[in-house]
Amino acid sequence: MPEQINITLGTAGHVDHGKTALVKFLTGCDTDRLKEEKERGMSIELGFAPCLIHDLEVGIVDVPGHEHFVKTMVAGATGMDGVLLVVAADDGVMPQTREHLDILQLLGLARGIVALTKIDRVEAGQRAAATEQVKAILRGTFLENAPIFPLSNLTGEGYDAFREGLEELAASIPRRRTDGIFRLPVERAFAVKGFGTVVSGIPVAGQAGVGDELVLLPQGISGKLRSTQIYQQTGPAARAGQCAALNVPQWDHRQISRGDTIAAPGYFSPCEWHTAHLRLLRQEGVSLHHPTRLRFHTGTTDVPATVYLLAGNNLAGGDEAVVQFHFEKPLVAGPGDRFIIRQLNPVRTIGGGRLLEGGARRLRRNRPEIIQEVTAQAQAVTDESAWLMECLKKAEKTAPRLAELALTAKQTTEQANRILQRMVGEGKALALEGGMFLHAETARQTVAELLRLTGEFHRQSPASPGISPEQLQTATRLARPVLDPLLVILKKEGRLVERVAGRVALPEHRATLPDAGQAQLDQLENLFRQRPFQPPDPGEAATALRISVTVINKLIRILEENRRLIFVGEGLRFHCEAVERARQLLTDYIRREGRLESVKFKYLLDTTRKYALPLLDYFDRTGLTLRSNNTRYLRKQS
């Protein structure tokens, strides 16, 4: 058995230039399977055939060349790794030769060869003229230096040289990676007696093995892969770049059509809006206005769409821009997917590019921050590491975990983890406790904001020992699982220090009050010391010290922040020394007597129920005592 490698070659060129005949000559397979194709003598649908190159087997997809079936050609071309551009020597370069070449360029193909067919119909001079014509249209394209092989599909003349060129082409194409998230744009679906539904196409990423769970989109129907065929041979898995047929019995083939998607569950969902990087062809009469309705092609999908420029109102031929598409039916796609756009009147290909990110709403135009973000995504989408970092950067203050980030980036957790660990080592990402990650730039900006807010708090509240984590959370809108690890890092680095009650401060900060304020603070604290178990409320303190209630409340807050006063509930605050004395009295009594009846506590403190019971409740809440009806016991850890 030959080794099956995940490379797919494909034909391109004008109708009746010999593409299907060439594939049959190479493979022995007639890819025109429909009765109408045989009657009309031209391809209407995509055809697939296995091609043996020495001891390797690759796939070949044959595309129709008629202008009415350009959408089908695009569906086939998106799965190609290399192209066999076919030009008939008797016709020369024709309209679909040029349009197919434009499409291949826009889809990013980088390798191919040229077959100059039907040389048996022309004289040597016309053959040479056709060759020069082909060279002319290839200038400036990825096929500029591609070899041109004259041949005849009837006589076999030139076939040996073409075969050698085909072998060199296949050898130059790297095999596709298969470690991504499996996704297959559906080419067709049919039923096989005894097996059920079979879906065919070329996976664009990942691999799916027998027994794997798959989801059909946009229908959202799950199913289990029962068997696979690759190049018409049964195998254990379907991999990216292979012409594959998947048998999933749970699905009804009548509910599946070209343009649907099969994918690993959980990663993809249909979206009506999608950002993209668009490039128009540099051709006469090609331009784009905001907004424009057109025909959009990606994978095997063909859907009406409206394109919105994110900046400006016009795009000229040859120009590039970041845009947003709105589709008339939701699209399933992945970051970096290539696409083609075709004008509606007159119908022709005018541009293409790469998709970036799906969304649920239209973005606001001419907003510098949005344009900058989408432009950065466009620059990153072709590199998996850069794309993951852009997804991490966009997460901003949420600090996603590995699985969440991998889901957003459409990468496996193994891929994402490998990239993240390298980025953390290079200082481009920050790993937080709890398995979360921050982009280094986000972390830098967030840390700067935390330090700025702390300094601002010191200026506004110089008497406070520091700002509380709760106040920082309110100001930054950071979740505590993100904020707390950042504070730990800042304290380890010495850029913040911890003060009483978990408050943090800049290292150089010292709590200060004006002399008059300090004297009032001392007076208030002494008043609480003098009345340890019958503490004054703000009104009583204001009367006793002849200070306004407003000032008293400010002084109480300062004493609380410095843990000199402790709020126990029900509007009561006790001096910290009083709380400690009450704790000791309570502990000694229960250790001696085994328990404490609540009513007894007021006698231990020489106070009233008004003050004693809230203190007991405070000790329950802080874990010192355990209450059973009106009886208190020491908790075991106490």
Image: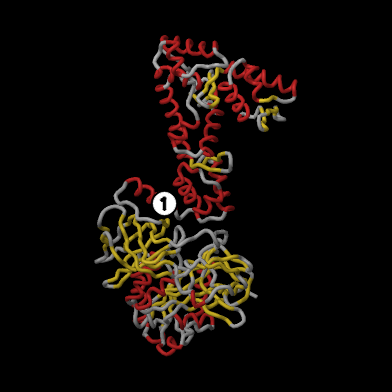
| Residue lying at 27% horizontally and 62% vertically, measured from the top left | 288
Q: Position of residue 138 (x, y in %)?
A: 36, 68
Q: Nearer the viewer, residue 568 or 311?
A: 568
Q: Position of residue 237 (x, y in %)?
A: 61, 68
Three-letter code, disc 1? Gln
Per the image, label 1 sits on a secondary structure element best described as helix
Q: Quadrant of residue 176?
A: bottom right
Q: Position of residue 452 (x, y in %)?
A: 42, 29
In-front residue for pair 632/610: 610
Q: Is residue 166 depicted above or below 176 in this figure?
A: below
Q: Is residue 484 left or right of residue 40?
A: right
| Residue positioned 30% across, 73% down in the render | 347
Q: How many marks?
A: 1
Q: Residues within 10 Å of mark 1 (few under 14, many from 20)?
A: many
Q: Name the quadrant containing residue 632.
A: top right
- Residue ID for mark 1: 377
Q: Position of 522 compared to 65: left or right?
A: right
- Res 454 seen here: yes
Question: What colour-coding does the image apply?
Answer: secondary structure
- Residue 495: image location, x then y, percent: 50, 26
Is residue 170 visible in this depiction of the protein?
A: no
Name the side, left or right, on which 480 lies relative to 106: right
At x 42%, y 81%, the residue is 44
- Residue closest to the eye, 496 or 47: 496
Quick one: quadrant of the N terminus?
A: bottom right
Q: Is residue 269 above or below residue 421?
A: below
Name the image quarter holding the C terminus: top right
Work out which residue is located at the far bottom of the displayed protein and give it: 39
Which residue is pictured at 55% across the width and 43% down the height?
436
